[in-house]
Amino acid sequence: MTSKGYNTVSLIRKKRDGKELNRDEIAYLIDEYTKDEVPDYQMSAFLMASYLNGLNEDEAASLTHSMLHSGRVLDLSDIPGKKVDKHSTGGVGDKLSLILAPIVASYDVPVPMISGRGLGHTGGTLDKMESIPGFNVDMTLDRYQDILAKCRMVMAGQTEEVAPADKRLYALRDVTATVESIPLIAGSIMSKKLAEGIDALVLDVKFGSGAFMKTREDAQKLAETLVAIGEDFGKETVAYLTNMNQPLGYKVGNWLEIEESMEGLQGDGPDDVMEVTHMLAGTMIMLGGKADSVGEGIAMSHKAVENGQAFEKWLELTEEQGGDTSVLKDFSAYDHAEYSFAFKAPRSGYITEIDAYSIGMASLELGAGRKRKDDIIDPAAGIELHHKIGSKVEKGQSLVTGYMNNENFVEASKNYLKDAFTIKDAEPESTDMITHRVDREGIHPIGD
């Protein structure tokens, strides 16, 4: 027994057997893990037991509270304005933060972003930003607040001071197949976001083949959990349910997604990317007190792209965080991947399905993601799609181009690509990108 009266193995066994852990027991596990008294292999066992047997509302709240208070909770009250952040539950080709943050910040709404790295088949915002030469996401909290005050936005990685338990559990979940758990996802997201010192939060909760929540029903449950936690902590929280049944945009991979983000900031982004971006940004602008409605916020979001103020804000932040802005203005100046290959359509017809998970894994196999915690990402690796669902293609036409710096990775990537596309004779029906809004008053279909 420990001095606190708890035995780690006994707590793991208790959760393994489907029993409830109380607040003190969960706090003990999180505290001791943060202090390196509980090793990775025991925390992995606890995560798997929690994944398989679930955590109830009280356990999820206790987990969030323990992770939030495992480090420092920021006080941003000295920075004028209502601080608003956004979080996505992760998807393939999801580069929205890179576009919406400068849009919102350009209207003097402070956007304090502490982001994560890639999880499984999905990319991480930090990995994408680090593909910009010199861009520094590691900083002290004092520097973090200085940048936020100066630029009205900041994009940084977690330090050991902010929700350190989440930083460690985030990486461990990625490599132990325990990502897709609503309470674990909710605890991770909300502990990190609440520690930022935000006043309001907008959430992009994805569902479909490329999301961790495969069904809209599961996404709704997660959104409701996240909104409830946010509101319980006194933060105005709004979530949107968005479709991830195919990759978002056309480019998947770290630098490739930076390219597409810069295109979006300059008015040339893919329709699906920009539709969701403007909805989320418009909501953030409204929550930040700069618009009277989401509709007005959306119009302001469009304007920030059209007049160039959003792109200029991104260049300002990049310079402040040490990044090379020349490659953002001229992509040809970037050190692109040495090799590429084309994956071609096996038959003629309409693309009726694109398995986003397979696209994400194909990109990972090329070096754009991690299989283990200590894997080094190749920022230039990834996948570029040439067609989306609804496109008519001919046999032998290129569906995607893969980019990599190691030719040995090609076959493993193609093994995923061959299962990624469904091509049929009949044209598919179109689907909505954004289906519902979830807030403190409940769930509302978009359009109501």
Image (cartoon, rainbow, N blue to C red):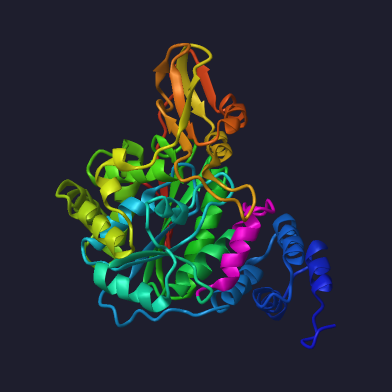
Magenta part of the chain: 162-182
Q: In this view, does 75 lie to the left or right of 310?
A: right
In the image, is residue 125 above or below residue 410? below
Q: Is residue 141 left or right of residue 216?
A: left
Picture residue at 52% right of the left edge, 37% below the top: 363
Q: Nearer the viewer, residue 404 or 258?
A: 404
Q: Nearer the viewer, residue 71 or 127?
A: 127
Q: In this view, does 81 lie to the left or right of 440?
A: left
In the image, is residue 15 above or below residue 72? above
Percent of width and height locating residue 97:
37, 54
Percent of width and height locating residue 207:
51, 44
Q: Is residue 94 left or right of residue 366?
A: left
Percent of width and height locating residue 275:
32, 43
Do we see residue 29 in this rendering?
yes
| 127 part of magenta stretch | no
Q: How many labels does the image show?
A: 0
In the image, is residue 2 above or below residue 134? below
Quadrant in the picture for residue 62: bottom right
Picture residue at 40% right of the left edge, 44% below the top: 255
Quadrant in the picture for residue 291: bottom left
Picture residue at 38% right of the left edge, 79% below the top: 142
